Image: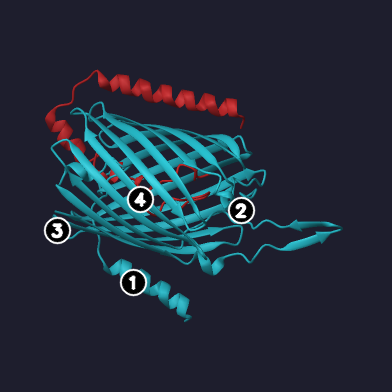
Chain colours: A cyan, B red
Amino acid sequence: MSQGRLLHTLWLLIALQIVLIGTLSAQGYDDAFEMRSKLKLEVQYADYGEYEYPEPILYRFGVAEYKQLEPYIANFPEKRLLIKLTRMTGDQTALGFRYQYSDIKEGVNQHFVEGKVTKQLTESITGLFAAQLLRDSREYTAFQAGIGTLWDLSVLTSVQFDLQYFYRGPEADVVGGQLSTGNLRVKARQVLTLSTALQAEYSFYSADGEAVSFNSHSIACWLSQYLPTETAVHLNVRYYTNSAGISSAAPSVEVAQYVDWATVLWLKYRHYFNRSDNVSLGEESIVIPDGLRSSSFSAQLNREMSRELLLYAKYRHYKSNMGVQMNTYMLGMVYSF
Amino acid sequence: MTRKAFGTIGLLLFIVVLCLTSAFFGGCVSSDLALQMETSVNSPIMKNLQDNDEDLFQIEDGIGAVGEAAACPT
């Protein structure tokens, strides 16, 4: 067994042995109002680097030099670290601070800092404001701010609205230079029966920059069914299109199972396929290739060790028809105090 | 599929959701039923999907930097 394979096996064993917990809250309107303070730590490792493409190939045709673009799909970060602290400052308000380090690829890393205020505006309405700063080792900085609200109309219905603005300056020439973007998301969840729920999400995204300008729309729908075996089954489909020449669809199925009152196992399979004009969305050497098909499978185990401590681990395998595959491992914990 | 068709589908889907919302919004739910829902359709595993986690591991197709609005998954 090679050293790399041994390492992967070891990670998997560690992940499986640390029996993990309940459920993490979602979308930023999280668990802030349950306890006075929460500390969250996560580490992630991906072996994508082992499958990295070689340097771009240079061709010469007459006097013109042609550089073949790297068929990267994305910058899959190999290593990540997250530290997040959430603290109640009153009955209705929570402050959050997050630091995240991402090792994007060889010689490229990012530091990400976020401050967030979440406030219970009324009994049924929660609002949030967040500001973020991103520093990239390629000598540029980006800023982002966002607002959002979650409205629980009743136990049957909830609606969520989010708005974000992003800006980076011309010094970011390595990823396409100056860029400003805005995105809007609307999401609704409706209980249909005692065991069935429907969820729909629409998002609009607009980018305007030196290297690229486009609008995109995506729509996703989830049909969720709770079974007597304490199982939740989620069928999901997402469709995406943008004015730069990319459209894609991604169906997925996700199953969550209560193993016991404190242990939850999540399994997910997702398939993705697209049509693209082989466009680059800013970073010159990276294109979104036409005919990309990929599949990913993930398993996550959550375990509530005590009222204060939640542990979780996740494994994900990704494979595409572009010859890229990777394994990703994540370990995390939430400590409430 | 054209953008127009996509917009139409999106609109129709939202109308469906709004209709369902209005249908349920007018009614009341007893505390017993609400409690029952908390252990079934509104239980955590029915609401907190993996993709919803706001933090790490959101790498899917397309550019995947977490929390970066410029990195819109394709």
Q: Is residue A191 visible?
A: no
Disc 2 or 3, which lies upstream in sequence?
Answer: 2
Of all residues shown, which one is farthest toward the right? A62
Give SS at disc 3: loop
Q: Nearer the viewer, mark 4 or mark 1?
A: 4
**Type of amino acid at the residue the image marks with label 3:** Ser
Horizontal side, residue A94 vs residue A288: left or right: left
Quadrant housing residue A329 = bottom left
Give SS at disc 1: helix
Rendered image: mark on residue A13 = 1
Q: State how far apart marks 2 and 3 are (Cα).
A: 45 Å
Residue A240: x, y in percent?
53, 38
Disc 1 or 3, which lies upstream in sequence?
Answer: 1
Q: State how far apart marks 4 and 1 are (Cα).
A: 32 Å
Give SS at disc 2: loop
Q: Nearer the viewer, mark 1 or mark 3?
A: 3
Q: State how far apart marks 1 and 3 are (Cα).
A: 22 Å
Residue at left 24%, top 51%? Answer: A85
> Label 2 crowding class (10 Å Cα cut-off): few <14, some 14-19, many 20+?
many
> Label 3 crowding class (10 Å Cα cut-off): few <14, some 14-19, many 20+?
few
**Type of amino acid at the residue the image marks with label 4:** Val
Rendered image: mark on residue A306 = 3
Rendered image: mark on residue A113 = 4
Vertical order, A46 against A143 (above or below): below
**Residue nearer the viewer, B42 or A62:** A62
Q: Are marks 2 and 3 in contact (CB under 8 Å)?
A: no
Disc 4 or 3, which lies upstream in sequence?
Answer: 4
**Residue nearer the viewer, A42 or B10:** A42
Q: Subunit of mark 2?
A: A
Q: Are marks 4 and 3 in contact (CB under 8 Å)?
A: no
Rendered image: mark on residue A150 = none
**Type of amino acid at the residue the image marks with label 2:** Ile
